[in-house]
Image: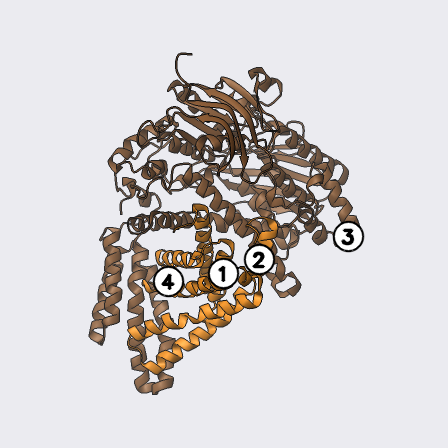
Chain colours: A orange, B brown
């Protein structure tokens, strides 16, 4: 990707790997729909906060999708790429508009994450529609999943500013 | 001399961009073919910076003087200089030896048919008599280092740069490396080695240079190396202090220190099986007892199982055979927290404090709660002074040099004042002066406070007069595998891993296209018959393509049931149970068929092969990132686990039972997540450096090693 050093790309790759690892670990213990959004949005926001590239979140999500496909964790299907990409694109857009303010505020991070999680409605609904699901059932199904995604995604994002502050103070990433 | 130099530095100086001062100053050096030059100097004096400058890996900065490699880029498909960094683990990018050595050629777009011959030649020159299909993970540390040397040699460089080989290699690994260097010299290659303790090189180097702390290079005399007591050479044959020569088999030397104490021993190991590197078939049986208030050194070569023993002693893993007791019971972090201090290998990864003082004070605050803040402050500052870190108390530990970080990590463990210290290779990467300081401090702690200490090391000589108990762990001889000739596309890798071959092998690309088509077909299916046909096709593919179909089938059924329950429930609620249940079941079936081909595809194709196939369709940087991250995922998770364990011993609330205590929740972020992210950042930097040192990104396209065709 243009303007992205190999080191940064690899770090985004590790964020993607941590998303997958957290997803795998949680799937073993919890059976609550949408709970994987907690770590997905936490790491996507963190990746964008650490790497100053306008498409860092989308790149992380793309890598997560590819890895989920390769590891057979995405329940198959190339559509998993869209499921990861849509929320990440929302994060990139929010980061573009809000710039560094986004990563300094818990409130903004939480709201961005909820907005990003809401985009999953589109992918969930599209998949159900393609499968020929009845419209009202599809709406209920997607709404149920999206609501849960938003709650977990929002909670996960609240920790991002504190972690970024710590990493900056530690000197591991560049200051604002 | 009639021949021209392969490297010429004329009053070369360098300063990092934004840096106030030069880190390298007026360095003049001529290196001729067939010569070996040795550079030494204290930690942080600029040795690695000079090697990186020669290889062209430094970021743009202020530069004076000349740096010239006359034969650079004389021919296509070669590199001017090859560099091998300290730690081979983060430089091995591919899972198999052949693909690993060929990585540089792939970046130079060398035709695949030319690769095998060059790879085999480079492996022979590096002294690695192994099949190209050998997984790099089963090689010992010394062999992995030589695999990195082969990866540099394959590009036929005029000069090879070696950075601190002595920091990671045991005496046997160093001896073999010395033989490799002698062989390369006889081939006319020039070699430049940076080394803290260059004694093992005394027989092969022609010129010896010392770096001053200001970054200047001064000529030294070869005799100085031995006279200064820097040699490893005399210690190669260090016998066990306990029971003479060990038996020729891979058993241990063991015993106790003869010091009888009425209380239970601090550590007791009985018939403890220690697996060595490789397939686990080589193992040692260990028996020893360490009384309280004594100090012991556990010595053994790379791969002998020293770190495995530390993991057993700290409860990080459980032995498959035999038993181990620490302070009277089986080791468990919950029981030993605060009483035992543990320094894991590469201790720098446990750092998370924003200042050196905060980092060191953490364990003191958590493990010595009864002490006042003033008292803790005084003891922390005293400890920092003892390790020459007093002036760095307010600096971020992340910004310190390699050796300084190592000392901060050690201080952070000592600050908790544990009764038992388990230190895995505490002198790794320290120069002689710092190593001596650490040994003195540990001896003082043992004598004054009665702290029991167990250290591990692969170099026995610094510990000669230090230990009461000397335990030797042997790994036997390096095995030599030369039984698999190179066959492009053979499945030796799977065979060694015990994976059954699929009945219907298909190229990965074809399988991927089939999987996508089946997925799309599922979305167009509108009748039960069509769904049944697709199910049959998928089932057939599952049994023909997957080496182990039953676990995949079980996983698939579980997923289907879970999906079907939710959707049928929703349909039942909307349309009533009679008509809704059937429609819901059909939709769930259809959705499942959209997912199932992907599950079959991933189960039937090894990840390494899929990533290689992806490299043909994705941009090569993206494909590389995916394969590197998947390759290093186990390492990162392992490190995360080790970080957690190390922090628990320093008093962090990272045990399962700590989840109930709200005030300890920040520890999960500060003590575990932040160090893991810092580790991920540094791992990314190391891998990127290793890849760029082998010209990754030189061309827009890459060729591919033919041995792992998809």
- For mark 2, give the secondary structure: helix
Residue, disc 4 = A74
Residue A91 appears at what percent x and percent y? 46, 63
Q: Is residue A95 visible?
A: yes
Q: Foreground residue, A30 or B294?
A: A30
Q: Chain of mark 3?
A: B
Tell me the number on the disc at residue B373.
3
Viewer-nearest of discs 2 and 4: 2
Q: Foreground residue, B34 or B32?
A: B32
Give the CA separation, mark 1 to mark 4. 21 Å
Q: Answer with the quarter of the image where residue B81 lies.
A: top left
Let me know if marks 2 and 4 both belong to one chain.
Answer: yes
- For mark 3, give the secondary structure: helix
Residue, disc 1 = A45
Viewer-nearest of discs 1 and 4: 1
Let me know if marks 1 and 4 both belong to one chain.
Answer: yes
Let me know if marks 2 and 3 both belong to one chain.
Answer: no
Count how many numbered circles sit on residues in the image: 4
- For mark 1, give the secondary structure: helix
Residue, disc 2 = A163
| As drawn, B373 above or below B472 | below
Let me know if marks 3 and 4 both belong to one chain.
Answer: no
């Amino acid at each position: 990707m243009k303007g992205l050093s190999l080191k940064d790309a690899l770090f985004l790759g590790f964020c993607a790997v941590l998303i997958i690892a957290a997803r795998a670990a949680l799937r073993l213990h919890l059976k609550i729909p949408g709970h994987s959004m907690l770590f997905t949005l936490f790491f996507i926001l963190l990746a964008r906060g650490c790497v100053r590239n306008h498409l860092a979140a989308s790149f992380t999500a793309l890598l997560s999708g590819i890895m989920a496909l390769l590891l057979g964790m995405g329940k198959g299907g190339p559509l998993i790429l869209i499921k990861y990409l849509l929320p990440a694109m929302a994060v990139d857009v929010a980061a573009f508009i809000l710039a560094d303010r986004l990563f300094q505020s818990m409130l903004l991070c939480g709201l961005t994450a909820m907005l990003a999680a809401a985009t999953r409605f589109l992918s969930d609904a599209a998949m159900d529609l393609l499968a020929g699901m009845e419209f009202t059932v599809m709406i209920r199904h997607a709404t149920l999943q999206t609501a849960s995604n938003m709650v977990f995604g929002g909670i996960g994002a609240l920790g991002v500013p504190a972690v970024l502050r710590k990493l900056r103070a530690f000197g591991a990433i560049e200051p604002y | 001399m009639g021949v021209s130099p392969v490297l010429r530095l004329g009053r070369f100086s360098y300063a990092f961009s934004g840096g106030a001062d030069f880190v390298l100053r007026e360095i003049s050096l001529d290196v001729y073919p067939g010569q070996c030059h040795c550079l030494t100097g204290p930690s942080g004096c600029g040795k690695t910076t000079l090697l990186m400058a020669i290889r062209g890996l430094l970021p743009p900065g202020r530069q004076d003087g000349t740096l010239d490699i006359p034969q650079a880029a004389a021919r296509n498909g070669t590199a001017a200089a090859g560099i091998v960094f300290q730690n081979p683990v983060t430089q091995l990018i591919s899972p198999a030896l052949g693909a690993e050595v060929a990585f540089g050629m792939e970046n130079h777009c060398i035709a695949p048919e030319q690769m095998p011959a060059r790879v085999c030649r480079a492996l022979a020159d590096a002294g690695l008599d192994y099949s190209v299909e050998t997984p790099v993970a089963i090689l010992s540390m010394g062999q992995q280092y030589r695999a990195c040397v082969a990866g540099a040699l394959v590009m036929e460089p005029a000069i090879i740069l070696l950075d601190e080989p002595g920091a990671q290699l045991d005496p046997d690994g160093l001896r073999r490396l010395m033989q490799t260097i002698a062989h390369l010299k006889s081939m006319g290659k020039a070699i430049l080695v940076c080394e803290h303790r260059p004694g093992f090189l005394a027989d092969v180097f022609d010129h010896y240079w010392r770096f001053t702390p200001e970054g200047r290079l001064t000529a030294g005399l070869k005799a100085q190396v031995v006279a200064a007591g820097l040699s490893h050479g005399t210690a190669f044959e260090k016998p066990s202090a306990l029971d003479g020569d060990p038996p020729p088999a891979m058993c241990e030397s063991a015993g106790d220190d003869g010091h009888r104490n009425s209380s239970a021993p601090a550590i007791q190991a009985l018939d403890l099986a220690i697996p060595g590197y490789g397939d686990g078939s080589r193992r040692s049986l260990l028996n020893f007892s360490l009384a309280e208030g004594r100090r012991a050194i556990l010595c053994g070569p790379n791969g002998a199982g020293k770190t495995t023993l530390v993991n057993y002693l700290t409860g990080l893993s459980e032995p498959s055979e035999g038993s181990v007791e620490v302070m009277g019971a089986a080791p468990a972090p919950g029981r030993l927290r605060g009483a035992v201090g543990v320094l894991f290998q590469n201790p720098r990864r446990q750092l998370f404090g924003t200042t050196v003082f905060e980092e060191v004070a953490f364990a003191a605050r958590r493990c010595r709660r009864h002490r006042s803040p003033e008292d803790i402050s005084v003891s922390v500052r005293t400890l920092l002074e003892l390790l020459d870190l007093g002036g760095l108390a307010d600096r971020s530990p992340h910004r310190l040099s390699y050796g300084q970080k190592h000392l901060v990590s050690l201080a952070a463990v000592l600050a908790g004042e544990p009764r038992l210290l388990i230190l895995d290779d505490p002198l790794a990467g320290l120069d002689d002066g710092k190593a001596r300081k650490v040994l003195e401090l540990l001896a003082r702690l043992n004598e004054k406070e009665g702290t029991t200490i167990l250290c591990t090391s692969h170099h026995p000589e610094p510990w000669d007069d230090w230990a009461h108990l000397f335990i030797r762990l042997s790994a036997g001889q390096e095995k030599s595998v030369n039984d698999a000739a190179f066959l492009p596309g053979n499945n030796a890798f799977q065979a060694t891993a015990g994976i059954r071959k699929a009945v219907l092998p298909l190229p990965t690309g074809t399988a991927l296209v089939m999987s996508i088509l089946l997925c799309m077909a599922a979305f167009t299916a509108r009748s039960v018959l069509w769904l049944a046909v697709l199910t049959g096709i998928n089932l057939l593919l599952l049994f023909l393509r997957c080496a182990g179909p039953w676990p995949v089938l079980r996983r698939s059924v579980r997923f289907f049931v879970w999906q079907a329950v939710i959707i049928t429930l929703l349909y039942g609620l909307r349309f009533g149970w009679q008509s809704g249940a059937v429609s819901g079941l059909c939709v769930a079936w259809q959705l499942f068929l959209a997912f199932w081909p992907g599950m079959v595809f991933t189960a039937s194709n090894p990840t390494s092969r899929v990533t290689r196939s992806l490299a043909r369709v994705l941009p090569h940087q993206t494909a590389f990132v995916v394969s590197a991250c998947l390759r290093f995922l186990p390492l990162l998770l392992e490190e995360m686990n080790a970080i957690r364990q190390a922090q628990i011993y320093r008093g962090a609330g990272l045990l399962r039972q700590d989840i109930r205590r709200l005030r300890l929740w920040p520890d999960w972020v500060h003590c575990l997540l932040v160090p893991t992210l810092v580790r991920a950042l540094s791992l990314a930097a190391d891998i990127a450096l290793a890849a760029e040192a082998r010209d990754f990104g030189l061309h827009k396209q890459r060729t591919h090693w033919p041995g792992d065709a998809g």
